[in-house]
Image: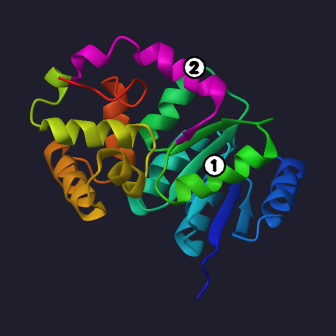
Amino acid sequence: MNDRVQVLIADDHPVFRSGLRALLATDPGLTVVGEVATGLEAVAATASEMPDVVLMDLNMPELDGVAATTQILQVNPRVAVLVLTMFDDDDSVFAAMRAGARGYLLKGTNQADILRAVHAVATGGAVFGPAVAQRILGFFAHGAAQSATTFPQLSDRELEVLDLLAQGDSNSRIANKLTISEKTVRNHVSNIFAKLAVADRAQAIIRAREAGLGVHKPYER
């Protein structure tokens, strides 16, 4: 059984793709299952190779990275898309988040941080580089006070779990922080998905961050 995280590289610059492949090859826990140069190729390759993670550039021919992410996750919601791009403007960042990307890093990010991010999103985490995180903090800084009215259908405990989800915590980390079992966390997560009418963790994180959760200390009523 192959326990390695399978990664698809989607970038239209062959030299950058080559560098990424060489970097990923240094990590024994990762394996590259393909390289593509266009958004349409990314969608097709994801369907055929079923990678765990797609490293996605945003500026690609035929279909841009945001549209490709949307199409990929409509068909394969379990795939983790990690954006790796030169664009750090608000429109690009939030368009990628709305499309369902689990992470957003800028090209030039430290190599060790890229490797850590691939592993993190593969296990359900959410990762944003420092510059991107600052934009998210600034954009959502006004939203924390609105969370109770935004999600009145959630219990206090479910709000706590959602806040930690939005911070990128795994189920095991949430269990440790709240001193509850992982099974209880899974039950809370399932209830959150049902009450928010979302399909997966990535969509729940987006909804939470739009309401100001995940970028502040845990919410208290």
Horizontal side of 44 relative to 218 (left or right) equals right
Disc 1 crowd, CA 10 A, few/some/many (<14, 14-19, 20+): many
The reply to whether discs 1 and 2 touch (Cβ–Cβ < 8 Å) is: no
Q: Residue furthest front?
A: 179
Q: Nearer the viewer, residue 107 or 72?
A: 107
Q: Quadrant of the C terminus?
A: top left
Q: Give percent across and percent down for residue 107.
A: 76, 36
State whether residue 12 appears in this view: no
The residue positioned 20% from the left and 52% from the top of the image is: 188
For the residue marked with disc 2, what is the amino acid? Gln
Q: Circle 2 is placed at which residue position?
A: 134
Can you say whether 48 is above or below 68 in the image?
below
Can you give x and y, in whole percent of width and height, for residue 130 in the image? 64, 27
In the rendered structure, the answer to whether residue 38 lies left or right of residue 90 reads right
Q: Is residue 13 visible?
A: yes
81 or 192: which is nearer to us?
192
* Colour theme: rainbow
The quadrant holding residue 57 is: top right
Q: Give the magenta-colored segment's residue range.
A: 127-147
The residue tagged 1 is 117
- What kind of element bears circle 2? helix
Q: Please, what is the dominant secondary structure of the magenta stretch?
A: helix
Residue at horizontal 66%, vertical 37%?
Answer: 105
Q: Amino acid at mark 1?
A: Ala
